[in-house]
Image (cartoon, grey):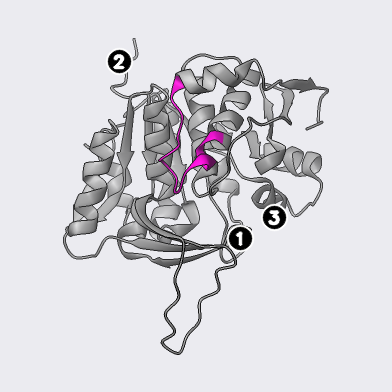
Amino acid sequence: MTERAPLDLLVVGDINPDVIVASPGLTPQFGQVEQLVDSASLVMGGSAAITAVGAARLGLRVGLCGVVGDDDLGQLMLVRLAEAGVDLQHLRVDASTPTGMSVILNRGDDRAVLTATGTISGLSPEDLSALPDRAARHVHAASYYLMSQAYRDALPAAFARFRAAGTSTSVDTNWDPRERWDLAELLAESDLFIPNEAELTAIARSPILERAVELVSENGCEVVVKRGERGGAATLGGRSYRVLRTPPVEYVDAVGAGDTFNAGFLAGRLQGRDAGTCLAMAVIAGTLSTGATGGTAAQPSLDDVDIWLASVPVEELGGGRV
């Protein structure tokens, strides 16, 4: 009999603070020009950390595997994660490297991101090897392309080890700065791939969403696609689903919305919800998270998501359509 895992979800990946500077039409000027902006906030950042906090708010027992520095910023991340109820037993403090940080310049219609990598890419093959075969019911890897090559090379074998022990797996890569999209080996060991539409079509090298889903699914994984204001789409269990309606929200910014989408979907799946409801939960959670600055301030509770389920219809489509 398989021993019950201590966690519902283990998220593996990046942890860092974000400094979000927001002002309409913001364009930095050099030459020692001082500009006044509407707001500046220091918030929880890193796709893995935002996903973990969002899933914990949705009722899952969540752990986080990542690296922070032995400095004030690293300590701040540890405190914020612990306050959110995230288990930190698999998190490592690296005294030799500063905690990574991103500065996000948000002008309303677009944003620029400046990142000092630091410990963001600090996960190693040894960190993966140190994880138990069944650390959680599900393992989700975030920000794949921000990690070291050695870690990326080791992740498919780690996923295979987890799956052999009865743990399901998923990945959200974010954008590949090199645009090589070398994912086939990892997707073959992933139960679920959760890209946004631009990432999916780039990986598949097809601008047609239905064809891109079909091509990526050939790796053996199910696909859930984030589509921003257009909701989401998925192929799950051989069926296709689409959500086109999103809850109304007073938009502030979309930082971390995709990570909260991930949290919503994984929460639904690990709570035993049906496939269409999982997609609706993802769309609702991601949308509601845009109502405050940063990735975690407006993340919803499970009650918040459930309130909107009746108002966010799910279409079940014929084979191959999304």
The answer to whether residue 93 is magenta is no
Q: The residue under label 2 is which amino acid type?
A: Glu
The mark found on residue 86 in the picture is: none
Q: Earlier in the sequence, mark 3 or mark 2?
A: 2
In the rendered view, tell whether residue 69 sits above or below residue 54: below
Question: In the depicted view, which residue is nearer to us: 121 or 298?
Answer: 298
Residue found 31% across the figure and 15% down from its top: 4
In the rendered view, tell whether residue 303 sits above or below residue 91: above
Q: How far from the left and from the top, in percent, is residue 156?
A: 47, 44
Res. 309 in view: yes
Q: Earlier in the sequence, mark 1 or mark 3?
A: 1
The 10 Å Cα crowd at callout 2, few under 14, some 14 to 19, many 20 or more, is few
Q: What element does badge 1 sit on? A: loop
* Residue designated by label 1: 110
For the C terminus, give its image quadrant. Answer: top right
Find out whether the residues at labels 3 and 2 contact each other: C-beta distance under 8 Å.
no
Find out whether the residues at labels 1 and 2 contact each other: C-beta distance under 8 Å.
no
Q: Earlier in the sequence, mark 1 or mark 2?
A: 2
Res. 190 in view: no
The 10 Å Cα crowd at callout 3, few under 14, some 14 to 19, many 20 or more, is some
In the rendered view, tell whether residue 92 sits above or below residue 273: below
Find out whether the residues at labels 1 and 3 contact each other: C-beta distance under 8 Å.
no
Q: The residue under label 1 is which amino acid type?
A: Asp
* Residue designated by label 2: 3
Residue found 48% across the figure and 52% down from its top: 144
* Residue designated by label 3: 202
The answer to whether residue 295 is magenta is yes
Please give left or right for residue 13 compared with residue 168 in the image: left
Q: How far from the left and from the top, in percent, is residue 262?
A: 52, 35
